[in-house]
Image (cartoon, rainbow, N blue to C red):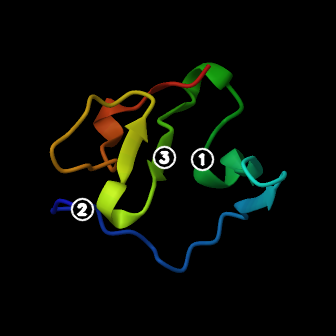
C-alpha cells in the first residue's frame, strides 16, 4: 500500500458480515452484507460508488483483478478517486 493513507478509526465496527462455503471441489459461494447506513449512505442507489477486487493464486502465480482499475505494476486497490457508480 502506498502512503500517505488516510488514518481511520480502527475501532469502528460497521456490522459488516461475510461468509464463504465450498460447493464441491472446484466451486465456492460467497456472501457479504455491508450495512451502508452505518457508513453514511442516505439510501440513494445512484450515490453508491466503489470497486470490486480479487487476489487469486499462490504467491508465485498470484493475479490481481479489479472491476474498474487498469492493470498496475504494483497493485494498489486503495484508490477511492478511481471508484465508479455501482448501480
- Cα–Cα span, label 2 and label 1: 25 Å
In terms of depth relative to the viewer, which is nearer, 30 or 87? Answer: 30
What kind of element bears circle 1? loop
Graded by Cα atoms within 10 Å as few (under 14), some (14 to 19) or many (20 or more), the crowding at tag 2 reads few
The answer to whether mark 3 and mark 1 are in CB contact below 8 A is no
- Cα–Cα span, label 3 and label 1: 25 Å
- Residue at screen point 30% across, 62% down: 60
First in sequence, mark 3 or 2: give its number: 2
Q: Is residue 32 above or below residue 51?
A: below
Graded by Cα atoms within 10 Å as few (under 14), some (14 to 19) or many (20 or more), the crowding at tag 1 reads few
- Residue at screen point 16% across, 63% down: 3
First in sequence, mark 2 or 1: give its number: 2
Eye-nearest disc, 3 or 1: 3
Lateral position of residue 14 relative to residue 9, left or right: right
Q: Is residue 3 above or below residue 84?
A: below
First in sequence, mark 3 or 1: give its number: 1
Residue placed under numbered mark 2 in the picture: 1
Lateral position of residue 81 relative to residue 41, left or right: left
Instruction: Quadrant for the C terminus, please.
Output: top right
Q: Residue 71: image x %, image y %?
A: 25, 33
Residue placed under numbered mark 3 in the picture: 54
Residue placed under numbered mark 1 in the picture: 40
State the mark number for residue 86. Answer: none
- Residue at screen point 67% across, 25% down: 44
In terms of depth relative to the viewer, which is nearer, 77 or 72? Answer: 72
Q: Residue 38: image x %, image y %?
A: 67, 55
Eye-nearest disc, 3 or 2: 3
Lateral position of residue 1 relative to residue 12, left or right: left
Amino acid at each position: 500500500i502506498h502512503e500517505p493513507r488516510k488514518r481511520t478509526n480502527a475501532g469502528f465496527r460497521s456490522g459488516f458480515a461475510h461468509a464463504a462455503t465450498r460447493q464441491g471441489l472446484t466451486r465456492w459461494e460467497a456472501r457479504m452484507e455491508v450495512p451502508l447506513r452505518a457508513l453514511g449512505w442516505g439510501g440513494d442507489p445512484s450515490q453508491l460508488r466503489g470497486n470490486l477486487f480479487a487476489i487469486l493464486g499462490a504467491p508465485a502465480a498470484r493475479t490481481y483483478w479489479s472491476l474498474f482499475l487498469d492493470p498496475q505494476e504494483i497493485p494498489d486497490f486503495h484508490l477511492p478517486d478511481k471508484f465508479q457508480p455501482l448501480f
